Image: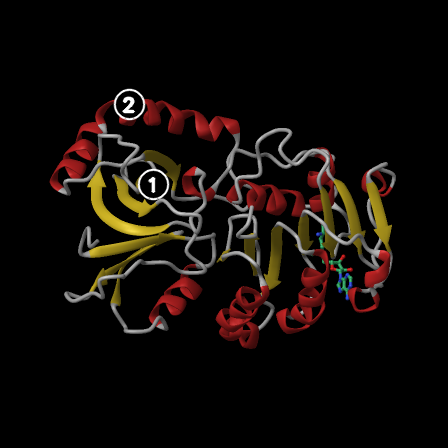
Amino acid sequence: MRLSEFVFATCRAGSEKALKKEVSLQPGKLLTPAFMRPQLITWKVQAELPTDFVFDALLGVVCGWSLGMARSAEDVAEILKKADLNVCAVHVFPRLISEDGLTPDEWAPVDALVDSLNQVCPISSESSYVLDVILGEAGEPWFIGCHPQSPASHPSAGALPRLTIPTEAPSRAWLKMEQSLAWLGLDSPGLLAGKSALELGSAPGGASWSLLQRGMKVIGVDTGAVDACVQNHPNYDHIGLPASQLPLDYLPEKIDLLACDMNLAPDVVLKYLEPLYQHLKPRWLVLTFKMNDARVEALMPYFIQQVQRFASGPVYAKQLHANRREVTLVSQAADV
Ligand SMILES: C[S@@+](CC[C@H](N)C(=O)[O-])C[C@H]1O[C@@H](n2cnc3c(N)ncnc32)[C@H](O)[C@@H]1O
């Protein structure tokens, strides 16, 4: 359904130009850039749109329809009334988000606003749209948009679960894993307890540490050294071999979560990942593809298609806030 003349996307700091380029290459040339601020871009849509048009982009963290600007909760209610739109949830988040997320102090004014918006916005569980209220710098009006609620979009406001990297986490990969688990809806306490994981590219161990803290048993594959808190954890088993030499016979017949975070070109990663996926039949996949050069960037849609080809459930891909020059792919097997 067409809700406006404009669409918008938020992005990771520094990805604006690449996002604009990605959208310019989308088939049909339906969008013309309109407005660009740090971490927020809008496009005008062509008069004629295919009936199944849904705006999305790999580098767009939140992608949806642009509905206008507002300075008060009442303005927002008016915008929704004019658009004749009910929403199922209200997401409020700042436009400027650092790769490490927001501190609790930065969330406090956001939360105060959520309460007042919830009082004036028509919320209906039957709506499939989430309202996005994006706060700019002091004095700037709020940017108002909405996006369809679907497994492709992150469930947290701004795709930003409320997380602070613990000082004891061995690496920032802790945050990447936690943001990915939240995307898959696996972040409720206790949900992963007793489940198993295997991670290719596990050192120094931030992501494995996240999974261990959630009560999982983890096999980590990496030739590099793993931090002592992970290495000495009773539920961690380190295989110090390159992925190319991983003996499948030594591995369990089934694993719940397959993670992969190797700093190799995606074509090489795919070569190791596909047979492992077929062998382990994981319910969940969490994978990063590094975008280390222009060739990889240009071929990224192809690499994602390759994962879609062998994964047993839908595959969603995004550059999350915690990602640097990489994108995250998540998938849940269809029979779960
Ligand atoms: C971005 S780091 C992984 C960070 C890690 N996931 C964490 O949580 O701290 C990339 C890792 O991939 C590993 N790696 C690169 N090539 C590999 C290969 N062929 N087999 C196994 N690990 C590999 C590197 O040794 C490096 O530790």
Which residue in the protein does label 2 denote? Answer: 116
- Residue 131 pos. (x, y %): 30, 39
Residue shown at 82% from the left, 55% from the top = 251
Residue shown at 16% from the left, 38% from the top = 79
Can you tell which mark lies on residue 273?
none
Outermost residue toward the front in this view:
335
Residue shown at 54% from the left, 75% from the top = 294
- Residue 57 pos. (x, y %): 40, 60
Local SS, label 2: helix
Can you tell which mark lies on residue 136?
1
In this view, 156 is above or below 119 = below
Outermost residue toward the bottom in this view:
295
Whichever of labels 1 and 2 marks the residue nearer the N terminus, that label is 2
- Residue 16 pos. (x, y %): 41, 59
- Residue 48 pos. (x, y %): 16, 67
Nearer-the-camera pick, 168 or 249:
249
